[in-house]
Each structure stands twice: as C-alpha cells, then as structure tokens.
Image (cartoon, rainbow, N blue to C red):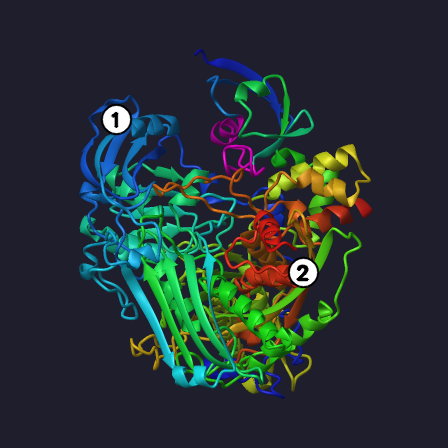
Amino acid sequence: MKPHNIQFSLNGEKVSLQVEPSDVLLDVLRGRLGIKSPKVGCDRGDCGTCTVLMNGKTIRSCLALAVEADGAEIVTLEGANSRPWTQKLQKTFHKKNAFQCGFCAPGVILSATELLEKNSKPTAHDIKEAIAGNLCRCTGYEPIVEAIAETVKG
Amino acid sequence: MDLQKLITKPKKGSKSIKAGDELTVVGRSVLRVDGWEKIKGAAKYTDDLEFGPGLLYAALVESPFAHARIKSIDVSKAEKLHGVVKVVTGRNFTQKFGLYMNDRYVFATDTVRFVGEQVAAVVATDPKIALRGAALVKVEYEELPAVMDAVKALEKDSPLVHPDLKSYTHVPWFFPKPGTNIAHWRKIRKGDLAKGFKDADLVMEDTYNVPRYAHCAIEPHSAIGLYDASGRLTMWTSSQSPFTQRHVFAETLKSFGLSHKDVRVISTYIGGGFGGKAGVTMEIIAAALAIAVPGRPVKLLWSRAQEFYNTYQRLGCTAKIKMGVSKAGKITALDFRLYWDSGAYVEYGANVVNAAGLSASGPYKVDNLSIDSMCTYTNLPPCGAYRGFGYSEFLFGLESHITRMAREMGLDPVEFRMKNAIKEGDTLPYGAHMNPTGIRDAIERVRREIRWGVKEKSSDPRKAIGKAQVCFWKSPAMPPNASSSAFLKFNEDGSINILVSGMEIGQGLLTVMAQIASEVLSVPVSKIRVETPDTDRNPYEWQTVGSHVTWGCGNAVKRAALEARERMLDLVQRVHCLDKSTLYLEDQHVKCRTKPDFALRFSDFVINGIQAEDHTFKGGPIMGSGVFMPEFASAISDPETGQGGHPNVHYTTGSAGIILEVDRETGKMKIKKVALAVDCGKAINPDLVRGQIVGGLLQGFATVLYEDIRYNEKGKLLNPNFSDYKIPTVMDMPDQVVPIIIEVAQPDGPYGARGVGEHTMIPCAPLIANAVEDALGVRIKSMPVTKEKVALAVKAAGK
C-alpha cells in the first residue's frame, strides 16, 4: 500500500505529513506530532480517553485512521484550552477538584465542550449522555457532573 | 532536638508553633495542587514521555496454554525480520523475583503456568514490527494438566503448579506447604471455639463465593528502560512503588553488576493504580530488555488485554463461614475458612491472603475465633493487591452472614452490629489491642441517614425497595518496617520544594503533603511544590499502597517541616539573641511574642542567612528531613495461632447503608441512596476524603453489579476489554451519595489522620446482597449480584 500525503488543521495550525494507510490518528498525533493530551486507554473505542474534536465533533482518535483527518480541523485539549466553553469548564473542574488521576480529563473536557458549544442549557440527562462514552475509574463521576452543571449555571 | 515529642504532644498553651492553636490549613478543602496541570492536559504520564528517534519497542510472545512444558523456542525467523533488533528469552534471566516470595520469573524458562505468560520478547524499531516479529517466534509446548480452582487445587491428585516450592525464599511470616499448592496458610486461633459454639443459641454455616476482578485503571501499564554505557539502569515506570521496584530490579539483575545506586526509577503521574500498579509486574520485563540492548531506550506498553491478564488480578475467594450467636445478640464463636485462588504466582497475592487472615473477624469483638486463610496456586493469571486487599472478599460473606443470623434470631441487624462492634482496647484476632475508633458514631450516623427501620415503597408497583447497613474495617497491610521519608527545602523567595516518594495516584497525596508542611511552616500551599518521585533525588518510601501514605508519608513530611522550623528558630535565637521559646512562625515570618515589632521574613534569610552586627552572615539554606517507621510493629507470631505479633499498625473503621430499588421482574437495581461514614482520624482535606468515598463506592458497586470475569475451561480469559467486562459509566451513578466523615484521632497520625483510600469500596457487595434480600426475600451468595442473577433467583423462589 502506498503512503498518503495528508494535510489538516491541528489546533489551528496547518500540518502536512506522509502516513501509511493503516496509521491510526491517535498514534500519529502522539507519536509524530507530539500531541499528548489524547491518551491510549483501550485501542478499541471503549474508554474515550483518546477523544479529540474533528470538525467540532468528538471522535475516538484510536478508531480513526490518520487519512480520515485529511482536510479536517482537528482540535485536541491543547488547542481547546483557548475556547470559551472549555475555559469556563476548566475553571469549575478546578474549583470542584473534579478529577483524581486526571487520565480521563482531556477526553471528558472535550466531550463536555462539544455539548456546551451545541447546547448551553443542557438538562442533567444531556450532561450524562454527553460524557457517557468517557470512562473514569476514580471519581464516581459525581464531581464531574456537578462541575459541568455548575458551569452551565455560570 | 526531640522531634518525636513535638509530634505526639502539641503542647497546649505553647505558642512556639504559631500564634493560635487553631489549624489553618489542615482540615480545609484546599484545591488540588495538581488540578490545573491535569485539567489543561499538561500532566505527563509515563507513555507521554519522549525518548527520541532511537526508542525501541517491545512485543511479547505469550503462552497459549494454562500449564505446559516449553520444549523449544525458535527465534531464527523473528531475528531475520527487518527492523528487529533483538529477541530475548528467559535464558539470560534466570533469577526469580517477588515482593514477599520469590516465585516469579522474568520470562517463563521451562514451564508456562497461565495463558498469556511471557515466554520471549521481540525488540524492534517500531511497535508494529515488534508485533510481527513476536508472531514469528515458534515455541513448542507439551501441555500439562492444569488446575483452575482454589478448592480443587487442594485435592490430593491435583496438578502441582510449583513442584519446587520448597526452594523458594519468602518473608518469615509466610507458611508455604511444599508438595501441595498451598503457598501460604495464615491461621488465627483465639479463645475457645468449641465453648463458643456451645454457648450459642444459633449456629449457622454457609459458603460465599467471590470471583476474580480486574483493576481497570484507565491508563495501561507502561515502562521504558535504558541501560547506559556508564552501567546504570534508568527505568521510567507507571508505578505506585518506585523504590520497591528499584529494589526488585537491583536484586533480580545483580548478576549484571547492578547495585541499588546504579538503578534509578522515575515515576510520573499515574492514570489510576488501585493496587494494580503496586509491586512489580511487567516492569521487570522492560528492565531485562534494557539490559539486553544496552545504550538504547526500550518501551513496553501493555495493551488493554494484557492489562487484564498479565498484571495482577484481585484474588478469587471461596469463604466457608460458621458462626454462633447468643439470644442476647452476641457473636459467641466464628470459624472462618477462606480459600483463595491466587493464580500462577503469588509473590504479592499471598500477602493479601495474610492480611485477610489477620482481620477476617471484621470490626467486631469475637472472643472465640478461628480463621484459616489459605493461599493456593492455580493455573490462572497471577493475583495481587487490589484496593481493599482481601477485605472486600471476606466482608461479602461475613456481612451477609451477620444480617442473616440477626434476622433469623429476630434481632435488628444494625443493633446487632452496634452491640458487637469493636472498641478501643479490645483484643484483636492476633492478640494486640484496638486503636481509638469511631465505629459506633459511624453506625449511628448512617442508620439515621438511611432511615433504618422505616419500610419504603416504590411508586412503581413493579419495583421493591430494600435497605441494608453493614460495617467495615481495614488496616494497611505492610511489612513491620515499611517506612517513609521526606526532604524539605526552602528557596530564595521563601517557597518550598518537598521531595517524597509517595505517589500521586489520584488520591491527592501531593496536596495533602503540601497542606501538612504549610500548617507547620505558615507558608501557603500555593508556595509549596511537591512532585512525583525519582529514586535518585527523592528519599525512600516503601510503596503507595494500603491507604498508608497520608499517615506514613504525612508523618515524615511533618517531621521534615518541624526540623526546618527548628533550624530557623535556632538561627534566629543565635543571631538576634531572642529566646527560642518566645519565637513562632506566622504568615511566612519568624515572630516573637515578647517583641511585637520583630518580624523576620523567610525570604530574607532561608537561603542567604542572617547578617550579624559585624556584617558577616550566619546560617545558610534551610532544609529539613523526616523519617517515619512504625517502630511498634512486628510480624512474627506463632504460626499455629497467629498470636504474639503486632502485624497491623491500626484499623480505619466505618459503616455504610443503602436504599436500593429492585425491579421484581428484571432484577434491575437502582441505588436510590447510599451513605458511608468513615473514621479517618482527621480529614486533612475533607473534599479529597469525599472524593475517595464517592469514587470508591462506585468502584465497589461495579464489582457486585456489573463486572463479571469469565474464563473458559482452558484457563483463557474471555472478556479482557471494556465491551465485555463492564465498568460503570456516568449512567450508573447512584441517585444520591452521602459521605460522612468521622474524626476520632489516630494518636500516631499526622494531626490524627489515618488512611481512607481503600475502605470506601469494601462494604459494597454485602450492602447489595442484603438489600436485595430485604427487598425481595432472595439471598444471593455468590458475587457478582447481577440483575440476571437476581431475576432468576426471584423466579426460582416463585415470588
């Protein structure tokens, strides 16, 4: 199989590189582009710790091929740190001590960002639905859900 | 300088510590010091570290059999693959290793003992090439009969997992039985069991089963090793135990000329541990591979499946319990036999068995007691530490049984627990005496919280509501000489760096250590940096396990801070001729009670000293060091009775209660409310304690409601992933969690604190089983208590 030349926007900057057709987006982000906030957790889309935004929507970057990013806008937490909803969320996550080990945090924050960018008045159920694909083994989820709800209240 | 005196007796009326006696930082919900780093995505975990283009990757050749003899290993094809740098087998690594018993191998040499055991490794320039190379290694096996069950492993004709058990070295408090599969047998004999049963008005006997569980930290294990030209081995590991790892690496690889000083372990943040990253598992492979390819870093990253079958699992346990109770509601006798499936290697797991054996009476005064806790080898993956360390397992049977017996006798199960609950000074199963405890307060607070005694009805007629309340206790399981230490250094601006080797595993250790130093030195937490360990720079810590670091490492930090304070006060006394007893620290100044205008700012002297009248400078950098070891502990006792030692340093106790809604038809359960009260001595950071309660409860409920490990008859794990082994999502949160903090001070704890991390998950299984019975009248005696099991039990009972 021939290598592909791909180009995409990563956290607002243009990147172009050559990838194998079988290269996974998560591996390319972490291994070749030095983007470390999306983590390797299960390699099969179960845990959500590799979550990134592709054209504003969350995807599991362990299930996406790098070639699928061609022409897309990819945002990881490193880039989302400047988005208004992300910043508001981060403030309340910090205030509520919402994470423990922190490994799931980048994925959870991006999932919550996606929710609030689409819907600034989510119900309690919407909040849970939005992060239901992000596994957290430490917190019991309560402080995370509370922090998102509090962010919405402002 | 008598630091011990300063710690154990904070003198009343003494103003030498600070202006007031009120604690200003300890006891406050200070925000996490690692909060922003994690929330910004900037926190680095082991797999995030960069090693440049020279980094090599390893993949393993694993056993497909539960028990087999290795006849031959052919690596020739793999070695020829372009990009493969080295193929490594057990031939060069013959030294056995282990934490408490040396029964484990770096690579299987002549025998494999579980499906997934490492036989060889392929080191290559790319992870995909390493995997391809591993597939090309040809291993010929001769399959041997295997044993998969702890009770069957005790039968006379059972295959022996370790025929050479006799030659294995182990700690003196283990009692293996060579020629059998028994790796350790902890016995407790106390009082007169026969008399206790004679005095009973009801004796009930039953068996409870607890399967294995997996930790499921979201971060998989990861280790990178570099053996450089100077002969030093540096390991970057995702670990709860950097110093213990250093020791095991140095001991296991000493034939390569390594001594402890040559081994350096660096551990960054870890993405969850729960005991699974304690001790040494896959890291020894990375260390051996580094030795095999000197000069180049080698990375070993576990897949999610390997995370399930080749780290540690929680032990499986068959618990046979016989208990006698008098009409007055006293436990008169308890005969408890615990048969543990500890897997192919028990170097860590045998100590779980030991810990449970010492404490299986639960938090009750039981004068006539017999406990047999038996660790058996099987041909399943190795087991070891898991949050709770054996207590979840025996509590399922014990707390189920207590509720059943109380009901049978017409006694209130909560009142029954109150009556039998242990008190300070009571004799423990092994003869030592119980520490101060707030268990009665915990029982009372939880009883009120769940409105015990008030029968509730669901608004949905298809559903029934059940309630339950149970108690728990747990002690750190550690060698009697497990110690902690700390260095504390002031900087020019009066800020502080603290070096410890307790690990931040999510529990908030860094924050709590900063709070303790802040309290002593009047420096705000924002000016104190505590970081994760590097064994070259940071002083010794045994391991971050057993819920002991707030207590042990906290004591060491407090002593280091007190030593730094002494040095400051000594210096001020010497240069300013002020009596030390009139000096105190406040708001980052040294102040004097008899001279209100005296205030010496820390930043004016903690590095560069104080200028004397003759223009010379006195003093120098202010530092402190602190060491803590529980000098009263001892693990040596009579092997036949367990009497004589003081193996456990203290117990944290508590109680938990639940209001559970159960669907009569589907068995589906919804936790309407759960309350958990734990006596943490002193909550140094109440919000972090709450975090442990809320998080620990969901992890505990997961083991009883969802997680369901499955092996086939050949010993192969069938569900090593999150699609088939379900851990809770946000949808599985209880409706309401009520955390309750009880504070009965631990006399030797920093500010009275004792551990709380593990305790919050251990009462969950009996809570569910007892509440299901309360709701629907069916008793489930094997975990997990899934909705399917409940629905089938209801159907079978015709209810």
Q: Which residue is mark 2?
A: B775
Q: Residue B172: percent from the left, percent from the top?
A: 27, 70
Residue that appears at 31% across and 67% down: B185
Instruction: Tell which subunit mark 2 falls on.
Output: B
Splitting the image into 4 quarters, where does residue B303 fall?
A: top left
Q: Does the residue at mark 2 contact the one at mark 1 (Cβ under 8 Å)?
A: no
Numbered range of the magenta stretch: A25-49
**Per the image, is A47 magenta?**
yes
Quadrant where the N terminus of chain B lies? bottom left
Residue B78 disc label? 1
Circle 1 sits in a helix, a strand or a loop, which is it? helix
Is B664 situated left or right of B578 in this image? right
B336 or B723, which is in the foreground? B336
The single residue placed furthest to the front in the displayed view is: B798
The correct choice, above or below, for B318 with respect to B555 in the image is above
Circle 2 sits in a helix, a strand or a loop, which is it? helix
Give the mark nearest the N terminus, 2 or 1: 1
Looking at the rendered structure, the kind of residue marked 2 is: Ala
Looking at the rendered structure, the kind of residue marked 1 is: Ala
B240 or B619, which is in the foreground? B240
> Would you say residue B723 is visible in this rendering?
yes
Is A146 situated left or right of B108 in this image? right
